[in-house]
Amino acid sequence: MRNVTVKNITVLGSGVMGHGIAQVSATAGYNVVLRDIKKEFLDKAMEKIRWSLDKLVSKEKISKGQGDAIFARITPMIDLGEAVKDAELVIEVVPEIMELKKSVYAELDSVAAPDVIFASNTSTLPITEIANTTSRPEKFIGIHFFNPPQLMKLVEVIPGEKTAQEITDLTLEYVESVNKQAVLCRRDVPGFIINRLFIPMVHEACFLRDRTGATLEEIDSAVKFKLGFPMGIFELADFTGMDVIHKATVEMHLRDDKVINPHPLVEKMFDEKKLGQKSGEGYYRYSDDKYERVSLSEELAKKCDPIQLVANIINNAAWLVTNGASDIEEIEKAARLGLGLRKPLFETARDIGIKKIVAELNTLADKHGEFYRPDPLLVSMV
Ligand SMILES: NC(=O)c1ccc[n+]([C@@H]2O[C@H](COP(=O)([O-])OP(=O)(O)OC[C@H]3O[C@@H](n4cnc5c(N)ncnc54)[C@H](O)[C@@H]3O)[C@@H](O)[C@H]2O)c1
């Protein structure tokens, strides 16, 4: 029997993700308290929310009255005890630093009523480990929105080892209520679903360049036109930011060194502050703040065989299935909504031939290490 109804949500952290999560929650009718540690951060966040709502009004997606009502449902606040006083659900969106998250939860746990649900928007940190530092691991869950939350439809929901089924159900309902599509990552595995597919592929694309001499544009064209990505993998990495990719790499590798075969270029670019579009240079150069698309073509795609990339992403997808974190249907849904894939991954793999992919993975494993050995699921599909 359900004994919690969520009406009041507190969002901890008003940065890139937090202000967006507050906005989508208020848009769905929740009363939202947005909490940060300094007034200036909150002022900036409220300004961004106002700007975003005004834009929706000018595009006639919502009326002026609706925009005002949504904005009025968000209360910025600094005092933590006051901020969580009425909350049924707290969504934590503070920086991706384990020690910081743990200290935030220690403080939160001491002021929030025992039945308040804690949801972390972490991209890569272990849910169970954070949950176990609180007095309520059964009421703790991962809720991974994508950037920007106002636009991205996908939310990964990740129960920890002790999360109660009721809390998972409630979280899935909340995600649906804010007009997003949830994908359940059934086990708290490094990278969850999307980052497990995406982050290792960025490294693999660097290796593909080294091994074949293909150019960035040729690889990106193949990724776009042969794999059905909305853009090239290097373009996507630049768009995401090499700081985000490097951080995710470190955290995922720390949890399980078999997840990623790290290419040194990712760390080098991070150290040299070549962060992608935000810094003006990543894999490509960008002349100003405006987002420019790299020129990719089907002609260029012909010059690159992306089988290593397909093999890498499909091997990780298979790993998620074999290890009980997901199933093929959910992975395809996540890849469509989270990576914008126009063609299902397993369809691409079948078009190339699973047998050929397994052979490629075995060749790569013999040459470059066990990291590449094909997952038993792929072997069984041959
Ligand atoms: N940026 C992304 O693309 C992205 C995407 C998905 C998930 N995430 C995850 O979301 C989380 C936040 O990332 P972000 O990019 O929004 O970070 P951010 O640095 O933009 O924002 C974090 C905010 O948290 C605030 N903060 C710090 N300590 C706090 C506390 N004790 N209480 C309340 N607020 C506090 C900071 O002042 C800052 O405003 C991370 O776990 C990150 O991995 C980020």
Image (spheres, grey):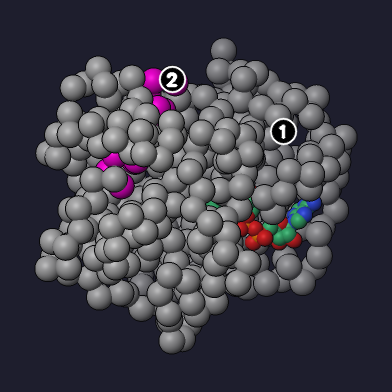
- Residue 212, image x, y percentages: 28, 57
Identify whether 13 is placed above or below 379: below
**Is residue 83 rendered to the left or right of residue 247?**
right
User: Circle 2 — which element?
Assistant: loop
Residue under numbered circle 1: 130
- Residue 317, image x, y percentages: 35, 33
* Residue drawn where x is 67% and y is 50% of the image: 96
Q: Which mark is residue 324?
A: 2
Residue 316 lies within the magenta run? yes
User: Circle 1 — which element?
Assistant: helix
* Residue drawn where x is 54% and y is 72% of the image: 274
Taking the image as drawn, is residue 32 in sight?
A: no
Mark 1 neighbour class, 10 Å CA radius: few under 14, some 14 to 19, many 20 or more? many
**Is residue 108 rendered to the left or right of residue 164?**
right
- Which of 218 and 326 lies nearest the eye of the viewer? 218
Q: Main secondary structure of the magenta part?
A: helix
